[in-house]
């Protein structure tokens, strides 16, 4: 099989539409845990840094904190993700209807067709897709989503996702030998993995082969990724897809804060002709300014050379709320990314 010529990458701004947390909200959720609030040193570090990823890295990787304090912070982070999942799981009927529309009319467009394999890449560690992308849905069932090289629990992509995922229901990440064997055959014909959900930073609800939490948080994410075989394989796939001929990447809800992600996009734009399309609530000049603050090279490569479409708005702006159909500008923008297949045939 070969990768589809269009791919989707989502960040925290995507799940924010459906009660997920942005960085500041996750900081609040972790800081408010009694495990942190009751520990003066952890509390001070989070107040001083005001960035949960920086605090997590400083506490976990440095020598300033005791093993017991590191364990407390680890449990607080896990608890915060549990609470976020419960929030997402319990969204209103109205929001669930909107999400179903987004999954059917936007996400599933990237499933690929024929001998193509479609890709939904994400930097998110929530369980939004696992909970609401139901393979029994009459539309989504035609474009079944799968987590490559992983044995998922029965509740994943079904209507059985619990509001609280117990540890015995967590997904066990395969060891290095298993990943190597599966990765070597990844591009072979596997119809059951035609539409791949690739969680580049791991996920809440995953356990590494050594029993640790398989989420990439904090500084030196590249190093953490290189030490986890499944994530290392996922990044190779990410590179392969972006480097494909005539590839277009739609990015929703990502603020370009991760250099290891940005560098792969820059490489694909510069050396392989990747075309980038962005959906963001920021005005274009504001987005460009933030991109430049991250690194000047990003403006030259991603903005000046790679950018082929920019939509100033959120997912909700893609929807005509009165009729529950794509808005005219939402439909126009998606067609610019050259979507095809089921959505064209049904017309």
Image (cartoon, rainbow, N blue to C red):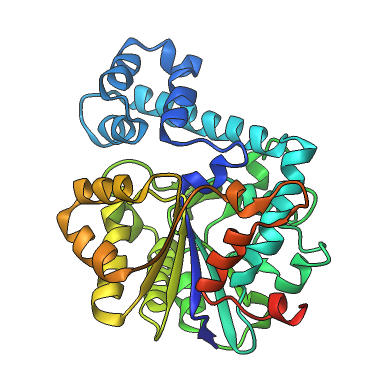
Side of 182 where 328 appears, left or right: right
Q: Quick one: 130 or 91, which is closer to the camera?
A: 91
Residue 303 seen from this side? yes
Q: Is residue 332 left or right of residue 143?
A: left
Look at the image and tell me whether residue 149 can be seen.
Answer: no
Is residue 48 or residue 169 the one in the foreground?
Answer: 48
Residue 153 rendering spot, x and y as whole percentages: 69, 55
Q: Is residue 96 left or right of residue 212?
A: right
* Position of residue 343 in the picture relative to residue 179 (left or right): right
Please state, as top left, top right, bottom left or bottom right, where the N terminus lies in the image. bottom right
Q: Nearer the viewer, residue 264 or 234?
A: 264
Residue 123 sits above or below residue 309 on the image: above
Residue 301 vs 222, above or below: the answer is below
Q: Which residue lies furthest to the left in this view?
A: 296
Quarter occupied by the C terminus: bottom right
Which residue shows up at 67% across the image and 46% down it? 169
Figure quadrant of residue 59: top left
**Image x and y of residue 168, in percent:** 66, 44
Which residue: 39% across, 75% down?
242
> Which image quarter: residue 233?
bottom left
> Who's the residue at 43% across and 13% down the image?
37
Q: Position of residue 69 (x, y in %)?
A: 36, 22
- Residue at the spot x=36%, y=28% of the render? 70
């Amino acid at each position: 099989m070969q990768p589809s010529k269009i791919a989707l990458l989502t960040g925290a701004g995507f799940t924010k539409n459906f009660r997920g947390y942005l960085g500041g909200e996750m900081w609040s959720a972790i800081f408010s845990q009694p495990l942190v609030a009751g520990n003066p040193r952890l509390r001070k570090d989070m107040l001083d840094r005001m960035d949960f990823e920086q605090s997590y890295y400083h506490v976990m990787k440095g020598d300033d904190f005791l093993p017991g304090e590191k364990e407390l912070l680890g449990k607080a982070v896990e608890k915060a993700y549990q609470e976020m999942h419960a929030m997402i799981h319990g969204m209103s009927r109205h929001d669930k209807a909107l999400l179903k529309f987004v999954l059917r009319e936007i996400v599933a467009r990237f499933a690929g067709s024929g001998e193509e394999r479609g890709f939904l890449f994400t930097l998110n560690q929530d369980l939004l897709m696992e909970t609401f992308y139901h393979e029994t849905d009459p539309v989504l069932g035609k474009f079944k989503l799968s987590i490559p090289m992983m044995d998922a629990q029965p509740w994943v992509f079904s209507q059985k996702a619990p509001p609280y995922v117990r540890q015995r229901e967590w997904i066990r990440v395969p060891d290095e030998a298993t990943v190597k064997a599966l990765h070597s055959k990844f591009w072979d014909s596997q119809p059951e993995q035609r539409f791949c959900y690739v969680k580049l930073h791991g996920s809440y609800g995953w356990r590494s082969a050594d029993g640790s939490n398989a989420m990439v948080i904090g500084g030196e994410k590249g190093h953490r990724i290189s030490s986890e075989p499944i994530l290392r394989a996922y990044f190779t796939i990410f590179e392969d897809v972006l480097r494909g001929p005539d590839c277009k990447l739609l990015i929703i809800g990502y603020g370009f804060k991760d250099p290891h992600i940005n560098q792969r996009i820059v490489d694909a734009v510069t050396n392989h002709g990747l075309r980038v399309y962005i959906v963001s609530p920021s005005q274009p000049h504001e987005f460009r300014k933030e991109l430049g603050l991250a690194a000047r090279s990003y403006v030259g490569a991603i903005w000046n050379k790679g950018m082929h479409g920019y939509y100033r708005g959120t997912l909700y702006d893609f929807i005509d709320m009165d009729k529950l159909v794509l808005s005219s500008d939402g439909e126009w923008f998606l067609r610019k990314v050259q979507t095809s297949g089921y959505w064209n045939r049904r017309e």
